[in-house]
Image (cartoon, rainbow, N blue to C red):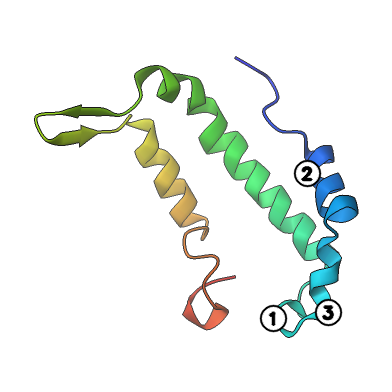
Amino acid sequence: MARQYVSMDTVRFLLNQVHPISDLFQYEKYRDYSSEDVEMLLSAAKDLADQHYFPHFTSMDQHGVQYENGEVTTPPELGEIIRATAEGGWIGGCDKPEHGGM
């Protein structure tokens, strides 16, 4: 299994140099955000992926999703991933803050 699945240096380079995310902060919708907020979000996303996504990728790829007799069966690890994602507040994060989004 690979030890590294994403280069955070590359992600930061893309978000800061290639597609400057800070340009968004001039708009009303993003005015309350800062580069520090983006860094916190990236760190939290990486932690979630390290703990709950990455450890299961190989197993999930090997077993995959099954469809038999009209039923879909997913790898059991998927439940853990979805629970951790929901508990972390990531589902619905793109909703407006007044509706529970970020």
Q: Nearer the viewer, residue 13 or 48?
A: 13
Q: In which quadrant of the rendered image does the C terminus lie?
A: bottom right
Q: Which circle's residue, 2 or 1, is located before the other in the chain?
A: 2
Where does residue 26 sit, x and y in percent of width and height? 83, 79
Q: Nearer the viewer, residue 62 or 20?
A: 20
Q: As drawn, which residue projects farthest toward the front?
A: 18
Q: CA–CA distance between discs 2 and 1?
A: 23 Å
Q: CA–CA distance between discs 3 and 1?
A: 9 Å
Label 3 sits on a secondary structure element that is helix
Kind of residue sitting beneath label 2: Val
For residue 62, the mark is: none
Q: CA–CA distance between discs 2 and 3?
A: 22 Å
Where does residue 79 sit, x and y in percent of width and height? 35, 40
Where does residue 20 sit, x and y in percent of width and height? 85, 60
Is residue 6 found left or right of 67 in the rendered image? right
For residue 26, the mark is: 3
Is residue 102 found left or right of 61 in the rendered image? right
Position of 94 relative to 61 (above/below): below
Q: Residue at x 65, y 17 (%)?
A: 2
Within-10-Å neighbours for mark 1: few <14, some 14–19, many 20+: few
| Residue holding disc 1 | 29
Q: As drawn, which residue projects farthest toward the left?
A: 69
Q: In which quadrant of the rendered image does the N terminus lie?
A: top right
Q: Quadrant of residue 7?
A: top right
Q: Residue at x 29, y 33 (%)?
A: 74
Where does residue 99 sit, x and y in percent of width and height? 47, 79
Within-10-Å neighbours for mark 2: few <14, some 14–19, many 20+: few
Kind of residue sitting beneath label 1: Lys
Position of 69 relative to 91 (above/below): above
| Residue holding disc 2 | 11
Q: Which circle's residue, 2 or 3, is located before the other in the chain?
A: 2
Q: Nearer the viewer, residue 76 or 20?
A: 20
